[in-house]
Image (cartoon, rainbow, N blue to C red):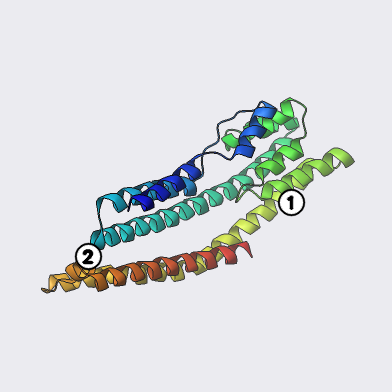
Amino acid sequence: MTLAAALLAAAAVALISPAPGRSLAAASTGRIGRRRPPFGPALICVLVGAGAVLVVLVDGLRLALALVILGTTAAGASLVARSRRTKAAETRQARVVQVAEALAGELRAGQPPLTSLEHCVDMWPAFGTVVAAARLGADVPSALRRMGRQPGAEGLREVASAWQVSERSGAGLATALSQVADTARARQATRRLVQGELASAQATARLVAGLPVLSLAMSAGIGGDPWHFLLATGPGLVCLGLGSVFAFAGLLWIDRIAVAVLRG
């Protein structure tokens, strides 16, 4: 038990500590910035530390139950994080359409490009990095492409291409941005249509995943004792663990299918 606890604690320390190469690179360049740690490693560190404590304090069926609870919590947190990332991507996609339309309208009204970019910050605060590049005389298309690396903001790459072509050829930027906005709006409408078609399958998957809990509640309501079997016996814990794995695997499978369809 002591050896297992030591190994788990060492794994937690390894996950928390930064990579040596990255630290040396930061020191050599003199740039030390705040970087928010990713959600996954932080959650792994918490689970590993909790597992180490459980190995020391408990054993047998209680340890198995605790590990099942920890695994279920981790899987649920992962699904919630994926859902939040998907919603953030949808928000960025809508912002791209708004920014492209606003830029085209401002330029048609005779506003200079810098002023048009500054007005977009009110709709999308993260657009301030592009405005800063324009004020400093830096490469605006490069700043737009950096923002376009975020999920859902891929349309900014088309805005960057239109901006770059206009700078080199003198072509009208407002017309090109209008075409970009029309393309982004059509892409958004297609995405919403596909999401509507996938919503029934995703809702069915969630319903199927929740049916075992409903069945257990109904069994307990008619005088049965399914919770004792699941939480206090070895075969029950095996069933609980396998059932949780299959349920979350099914939800993740449906989610990945939806993501693949939307990307296609």
Question: Which one is in front in this view, the residue at disc 2 or the one at disc 1?
Answer: 2
Residue at image coords 63%, 48%: 153
Spot occupied by residue 55 in the image (x, y as percentages of width and height): 31, 53
Residue at image coords 36%, 72%: 208
Q: Quadrant of residue 24?
A: top right
Residue 154 shows up from this direction: yes
Q: Residues within 10 Å of mark 2 (few under 14, many from 20)?
A: some
Residue contact between numbered discs 2 and 1, judged by CB atoms under 8 Å: no
Regarding mark 1 in the picture, which secondary structure is present there?
A: helix
Nearer to us in this view, 66 or 5: 5
Q: What kind of residue is marked 2?
A: Leu
Nearer to us in this view, 243 or 67: 67
Decide which of tag 2 and tag 1 comes sooner along the chain: 1
Residue at image coords 63%, 46%: 96
Per the rendering, the mark at residue 179 is: 1
Per the rendering, the mark at residue 96 is: none
The residue that disc 2 covers is 231
Position of 19 relative to 137 (above/below): below
